[in-house]
Amino acid sequence: MPPQRLKLTDIARLAGVSRATASYVINGQARARRISDETINHVMAVVERSGFRIDAQAAALRRGASRTLGLIVPDLENASYARLTKLIERGSRQQGYQLLITDSDDEPATERELALSLRAQGCAALIVATSLPDASDFYAPLQDSGLPVIALDRPMDPERFICVVSDNEAAAEQLTRSLLTPLPASLAWLDAMPQLGITLERRQGFAAAVAGLPVRSFRLCGQRYDRASGLLLGRQLLQAPLPEAIVTASYPLLAGLFDAFLETGQGLPQQLRIATFGDDRLLDFIPLPVHSMPQRHAAIAEMVLECAIAATLKHYFPGRQTVSRQLRLR
């Protein structure tokens, strides 16, 4: 006789909380109800251990009727993620799907809560740019329960998940090399979130570019890939002799670096050489040339959406699909 499926009241009892509290956590309303992170994490741990899935999701999976996709991005203020979100939403709508868009603020606890909430709302597939250091371990049970997961931009284990990403290591090496002629005496690399795969891959590319060269290279790492972290890293740079060249691992970090220079009241040093992941038209108008490595947003969005819709039809083939970048010199 198969084991009886747990109900919401069972989850509440096992977690030692009220039924209402369990419901708020599972349905993504915990923040609005001012439920503590400790309680959220405890309830979610019980949910994962028990394999709990609310009736709406189970019914949607049984019918194969859900035409809703879920999307979790780390920062909608990031122009690159905003562009990808817009393209994925438009493509979803054109193919008869609705897209539920969420923003994790690069907070692992928030991301976990959002993932469970999107599953509870009956999403047929989940697209996620993860902030979790243990992303593969967290999302594997969700996928095993019937929710296909597609990793966007930030890779997970390609043996278990479809990953649609840009080339990170090769792009970082090429971007760094763009500043090495003539060879600078010193070179700084600015990134964030060292636990993420994209950070490690880009660092490897940077290291490969400077290996064996007579250049003093060093790294600074921020808390997040956002403008505020870039500002803090810029202030840190300005406390010591400025390097001759700087590479930033994301455009928001570059924007924060510019903020740090503006704080000095002296603007950008004319001899400074800069390169960055990402791109923005504003770089064409500043007096200092900045090399950039933009993403091919349309190609990524098209590939992600194709994989997500195929997954809803039970066509899911794990692996890493890489979309190349193209260096832009100024």
Image: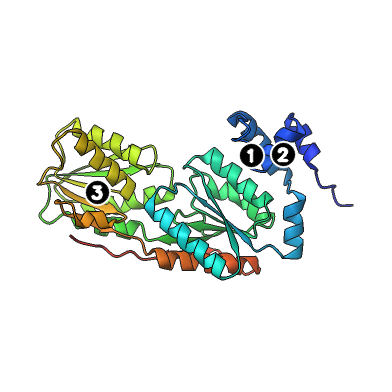
- Which residue is the extreme one toward the right? 1
Where in the figure is residue 305, as x and y percent of width and height? 53, 66
**Location of residue 205 (image quadrant):** bottom left
The reply to whether callout 2 and callout 1 are in contact (CB within 8 Å) is yes
Residue with the mark numbered 1: 29
Residue with the mark numbered 2: 23
Mark 1, other Cα within 10 Å: few <14 / some 14–19 / many ≥20: some
The reply to whether callout 3 and callout 2 are in contact (CB within 8 Å) is no
The tag on residue 309 is none
Mark 2, other Cα within 10 Å: few <14 / some 14–19 / many ≥20: some
- Image check: 97 left or right of 1? left
- Image check: 23 left or right of 257? right
Which of the two labelled residues, at mark 3 and mark 2, occupies the earlier sequence position?
2
Q: Secondary structure at mark 2?
A: helix
Where in the figure is residue 137, as x and y percent of width and height? 58, 47
Which residue is at 23% across, 52% downward? 275
**Location of residue 7 (image quadrant):** top right
Where in the figure is residue 199, as x and y percent of width and height? 38, 48
Q: Nearer the viewer, residue 283 or 242?
A: 283
The tag on residue 247 is 3
The reply to whether callout 3 and callout 1 are in contact (CB within 8 Å) is no
Q: Give me the C-alpha separation between circle 3 and circle 2.
A: 46 Å
Which of the two labelled residues, at mark 3 and mark 1, occupies the earlier sequence position?
1
Which residue is at 73% across, 59% downward? 60
Which quarter shows the C terminus? Answer: bottom left
